[in-house]
Image (cartoon, rainbow, N blue to C red):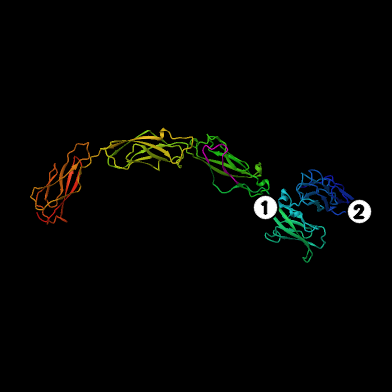
Amino acid sequence: MKRKASENPPRRERCSADVVPVITVDAKPVLLVAVAEDVECVPGFQEKNYELEYQSGFRKEESILKVNFDDCHGNENVNFEVSHPAFIVDEDGSVVPSRDVTDSGSTLFIHGRTAFADDMAEIKIHGAPERRLTLKEILGLGQSPAFMRTKRSLLAPPMFVPENQRAPFPKNVGKVISSEMPDSALFKLTGKGADQEPKGIFYINKKTGEVLVSRSLDRERIAFYHMQVETTDLSGKTLEGPVDVEVAIIDQNDNRPIFKGGPHMGEILEGSPTGTTVMRMTAYDADDPNTDNAVLRYNIVKQTPDKPSPNMFYIDPEKGDIVTVVSPALLDRESMPSHKYELEIVAKDMAGSDVGLTGTATATITITDKNDHAPEFTKPLFQATVNEGVTGVIVNLTVEDKDDPTTGGWRAVYSIINGNPGQSFEMNTNAQNNQGMLTVVKPLDYEISAFHTLLIKVENEDPLVPDVAYGPSSTATVQVTVMDVNEGPIFYPDPMRVTRHENIPIGSGIATLNATDPDSLQHQTIKFAMLKDPAGWLSVHPVKGTVNTTAILDRESTYVKDNAYTAIFMATDNGKAAILSVSFKWVSSHF
């Protein structure tokens, strides 16, 4: 904390009194002033060490003591800095807490500076709990160990350098103070940033102790430099120190928020309650997270499409959570103009102030489907015609479903719930168009049944939501007409085996062919004929089907194989034919 003194007393060449610290009495600390002999005025704090007794803390705006700082030139533009951010030094030198303080720690340092003096005083607080000081406190959140020192005669106050400074360089950063430094002694600065990589960023005036920076710095590369300073004689021998020199780089808002990764995708189930979280958008800012330079605020600047409401979503300005703000009824996927919504998200630093830098990203939100629509047949009755004796798909049943075609809430499952006692039919789903394919898997017989009536039900792979049920439109009737086909006569038995003696008389009857017409509803005539008679030994009556010999049956003929002779006969109705193989076998080698 800093305070400027105004209406300073006139310039003094001598100091007439020293401030002597005294332990507190009751609740408040008091000071005694002891008169001393006049001495030459020494610029800086006229008393460098103070002591207090800790009494359960310090109250807001109640002075704890007064310090006496004199630059011997009227104290123009004096600036004070206290190692604890809750304390300030008023115009009259009073050290005052700006809030109730219980964490003062056992030591406070006060840095006073004018054009003619740069000095530090120390306040010891007896009985106060120890407090560990950090660099973050120096940057506005507390204090730095830079106020602490190993030897009281060599002091290195905390130093700060804004990043991105412009030329000319070098620029003064701060000053190391030694109250007991001989005239011939020199200051020496070491460490990273001085004589170690990155070298040459900081250097020190060997005579005055002024620390200078040689070029512009980037806090995002290095935020803090820790170096050491000591005093040496002309031969390089250390006289005092080393003590820490800590330089903090003050952040500037030179980095825009960035949304890493992407694409940024989210999903929300249709009909979700208002306030349902969809996704979180997170941007990153490379600036100092302990400053407003990296404090982000989020906003939705555009929604596409803007129907059914231009403000369907809301983003938490601090967390980046995107939530729904429309009613579940409006979040109906089937009635929305698009299943995807794009939100243009802007992140602004400086806590969203007008001077903040911005970064932009697009969030894509998909409205996902729930199975809130039952599939329905496009008509209640389907008809099919099929020839008897064939198998395969005979009709495709069409359905409509408003749900997402990529989900099980759209894909149909068909079943036959009536009219299929012989399991001659089967239902399957066409995966390409969701149609139901009615298939004949066992050949139908016109003569047994010329008509079949099936009741078909359609459902979804996924169950319906609780408040939706399958209705009458989820069933349909299929009427199947079986067409009669002219079937060929049927021989019985087939094949036929006949045993006869060889050398029987010509014209002997040796067999009678039996054939029936399966087309019982068609009155057709069956006729018989010889199809194959290799030796020319046989004949068949075209109507009766009797088979007689036309030559002597010779068992030793080359047409006889394995003691058997084979002839093939044909039976035909009005349109189709059947073929019968008849084998003749001899029971002995002679009659």
Which residue is located at x 51 percent, y 38 percent? 270
Read off the residue under disc 2.
38
Specify the quadrant of the image occupied by residue 589.
bottom left
Does 493 sit left or right of 239 as displayed?
left
Check residue 454 in the rendering and tell me which mark sits there, or answer none. none
Does 337 sit left or right of 236 as displayed?
left
**What secondary structure is found at the residue carrying circle 1?**
loop
Read off the residue under disc 1.
219
Does 12 sit left or right of 431 as displayed?
right
State the residue in front, 27 or 39.
27
Give the residue type that dot 2 points to.
Asp
Q: Secondary structure of the magenta portion, mostly? A: loop
State the residue in front, 559 or 334.
559
Quote the CA–CA distance across marks 2 and 1.
Answer: 49 Å
The reply to whether residue 32 is in sight is yes
Magenta-colored span:
268-282
**What secondary structure is found at the residue carrying circle 2?**
strand
Does 506 sit left or right of 526 as displayed?
left
Give the residue type that dot 1 points to.
Arg
State the residue in front, 528 or 141.
528
Residue at the extreme right:
37
